[in-house]
Amino acid sequence: MPYAYLFQCPGCRYDIELVGAKEFWITPAGERADYEYPEPDTYEWPIRRVSGLWNHVWCPACRELRHLVIAELPEPAEHPVQAFLLAEAEGRSGDEVGPCPACGTLTLHDLEGQPCPRCPEGRLTLIGEYET
Ligand SMILES: [Zn+2]
Ligand SMILES: [Zn+2]
């Protein structure tokens, strides 16, 4: 399951949620987007299928959330578990980081002690971890 880390600035309460191994799907426009599970007992058509997993990471230079693909299936999967099996087979655990696609700076998975993007003196601190 994907898991999330919530960091917050004690000064201004700005918070940032980073997620590891989150499912994504390919939208009809051909773009990757977070996959949301349908509500139980609802029927959706066309059925959305999971195409892979990505991490929500933070670029300290852009001060923006970025997405790092850690597993991508050649074909969208019937069941999301296939994306997790692929990630596991490739040794991905959800804490990977990579260069920011916009500026090339190495993104961050852990923001503990990082400067707050909103206020001059704040330092981010981990306030919660949970499965999503
Ligand atoms: Zn702050
Ligand atoms: Zn960047």
Image (spheres, rainbow, N blue to C red):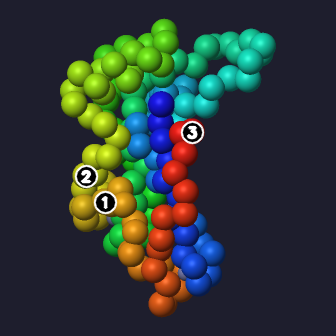
Q: Are marks 2 and 3 in contact (CB under 8 Å)?
A: no
Kind of residue at badge 3 = Thr
Question: Residue 107, which numbered label?
Answer: 1
Residue at the (45%, 58%) spot, across then down: 65
Residue in the picture at 40% in, 69% down? 112
Q: Amino acid at mark 1?
A: Thr
**Residue beneath disc 2:** 98
Residue indicated by mark 3: 132
> Rounded to the nearest whole Å, what is the CA distance between mark 1 and mark 3?
21 Å
Asked whether disc 2 touches disc 1, contact meaning CB atoms under 8 Å apart, the reply is yes
Q: Earlier in the sequence, mark 2 or mark 1?
A: 2
In the image, is 45 to the left or to the right of 102? right
Between marks 2 and 1, how big is the CA–CA gap?
A: 6 Å
Q: Ligand 1 sits in which quadrant? A: bottom right
Q: Secondary structure at mark 3?
A: loop
Label 2, label 3: how many angstroms apart (C-alpha)? 22 Å
Q: Residues within 10 Å of mark 2 (few under 14, many from 20)?
A: many
Q: Nearer the viewer, residue 103 or 6?
A: 6
Residue lying furthest top: 78
Residue 79's place in the image compared with 91, above or below, is above
Relative side of 99 to 65, left or right: left
Percent across and percent down for residue 132 are 57, 39
Residue at 50%, 47% in the rendered image? 4
At label 1, counting other C-alpha atoms closer than 10 Å, the crowd grade (few under 14, some 14-19, many 20 or more) is: many
Q: Residue 19, position in %: x, y?
A: 46, 47
- Measured as percent of width and height from the top left, residue 127 is found at 54, 63
Mark 3 Cα-neighbour bin, 10 Å: few <14, some 14–19, many ≥20: few
- Residue type at tag 2: Gly
**Secondary structure under badge 2?**
loop
Q: Earlier in the sequence, mark 1 or mark 3?
A: 1
